Image: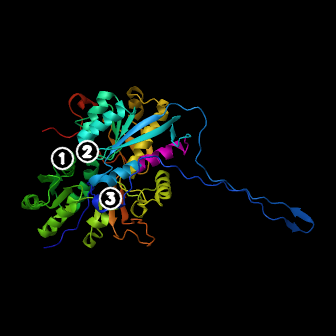
Amino acid sequence: MKKARLIILTMLVIIPLLVTSCVQQVTEVPEVETEEPVVEETEEIVEETEEVVDETEEVEEPEETEVVEKELGPVLKIGQIGQMSGLMALYGLQQQRGFLMGLEYMSGGEMDEEGRYIIANRPVEVIVKDDEGDPEKAVALALELIERDGVELIQGPVSSAAAIALTNVALENEIILMIDPAASYFMTGAYFNPYVFRTSRTSFDDTLIIAKYLVENVGPTFAHIGIDNAFGQGSGAALKYSVEQFGGELVADVYAPFETTDFTPYIQQVMDSGAENLFLTWAGTGYVTLFQNLADMGALEEMTVGTGFGDNASFAAVFGEQTLDSIGLNVYHYTVPDNPVNDWLVENHFNRYKDEADAAINAYPDLFTAGGMASAIALATALEMTGGDTSGEAMIPALEGLMFEGPKGTYHIRPEDHVCEQPMNILQLVNLNPDLDGDGINEYEFFETIYVSEYDELGVPCTLAGEYADRCGDLPTIPTE
């Protein structure tokens, strides 16, 4: 039987337990290194015949972090909630560092005497909290941040279930919630309210761009194995919609508990369905077990199995030599975008973290670093428009319809449902060695770029429901059954 190629679709793929021993949590804004000013150098006097020419070379001094002494507005406290420990700690670290880089970028490096970046004439203090992926803890932390710490904006989290829980906190407290990295479309769909925004992509971004490729190049029938939670179910619904847009059919939609250690019965269900393609929506160390069970049962020989080009640090643990030359989808890889914002991010992220204890694996921006930065850019842009006013009355109209340039390129927050349209990548895996130059710092130059979508080409559907359904207007919607 002919072995099917492995086609890759972005679903959150992470094996952080393999790398968390190298991850250092960052909870404070570190000091930004400043360079000593360059002293102007004067060339020697040169005698030519009887005339003496004095030539002085002007040397441009490097930019330094500017400590602002002007009168500033009150400190702006932003609460950042994410998984800073446990299975998703690597994602939380990327979110945290990316957000910090975004503040630095938008402030132009201006800081107050306390080392806080200045946005809209207000020093910004970020208070980071670890929700451990627990929705109830996320809610408790958010309320603590609002009521005790006085935060005026909330950013995060990693978990889609936690993000859904936080939407109600945002509404009840009339505080802007900027979601990233959580990917479920439910937060800007069934659980939408006007205070909820996102810079994270949705499950539909993942599935739409690759569904067309698979239908046209492999076959029209699909099966899905996902985690039995908001993330997995959201991805399953997005997959069904996406394949049907291109004439395909989802013939088996199977869910397993996150704690599953034996996937045999779930794999058997999808093999019995006769589907030509199998999508996997998984996260955490269970992914390795799932893939091993697929190999043991011969599913890799019978079906085209797809999942995601995920984070760099755990990549080699997931993908083996048999996956080389495969085509897949990716949310962000720092080697792909060609724009000034990404150039700035890559250079400054490396310079900031190359001497940290985790530099060997985390010196370069990773999967969700771009999302953290995009959140900071969006919020900072809106704050400049409102003059630092964080109220919903000011921020909601500033964020609705906002277009901005970020590390992936152009982003657009749709005014109707606050979905953030953005580019997505289709890549080819050409290398599995993370440190090709052998310098001890992984560059993760794994891919060649096949295609990068325009920010607005995917036609992500509007999934608003109930009292907000009419806001969809002329946007594409999911058919109601």
Left or right placement of residue 388 versus residue 113 in this view: left
For image coordinates 47% across by 55% down, the residue present is 349
For image coordinates 18% across by 47% down, the residue present is 229
> Which amino acid type is shown beneath numbered disc 3?
Thr
Return the residue nearer the eye: 103 or 303: 103
Give the extent of the magenta segment.
97-111
Q: Is residue 73 above or below residue 365?
A: above
Res. 311 image quadrant: bottom left
- Tag 3's secondary structure? helix
Q: Is residue 454 visible?
A: no
Res. 51 image quadrant: bottom right
Q: Is residue 211 above or below residue 459?
A: below
Return the residue nearer the eye: 66 or 415: 66
What is the number of the mark on residue 20? 3
Q: Is residue 64 magenta?
A: no
Q: Are marks 3 and 1 in contact (CB under 8 Å)?
A: no
Q: Residues within 10 Å of mark 2 (few under 14, many from 20)?
A: many
Q: Nearer the viewer, mark 3 or mark 1?
A: 3
* Residue carrying label 2: 160
* Residue carrying label 1: 229
Residue extending farthest to the front is: 148
Q: CA distance from mark 3 to mark 1?
A: 24 Å
Left or right placement of residue 304 versus residue 177 in this view: left
- Mark 3 vs 1, N-terminal side: 3
- Mark 1 vs 2, N-terminal side: 2
Q: CA distance from mark 2 to mark 3?
A: 21 Å
Res. 77 image quadrant: top left
Q: CA distance from mark 1 to mark 2?
A: 9 Å
Q: Where does residue 109 sit, x and y in percent of width and height?
A: 54, 46
> Which amino acid type is shown beneath numbered disc 2?
Ser
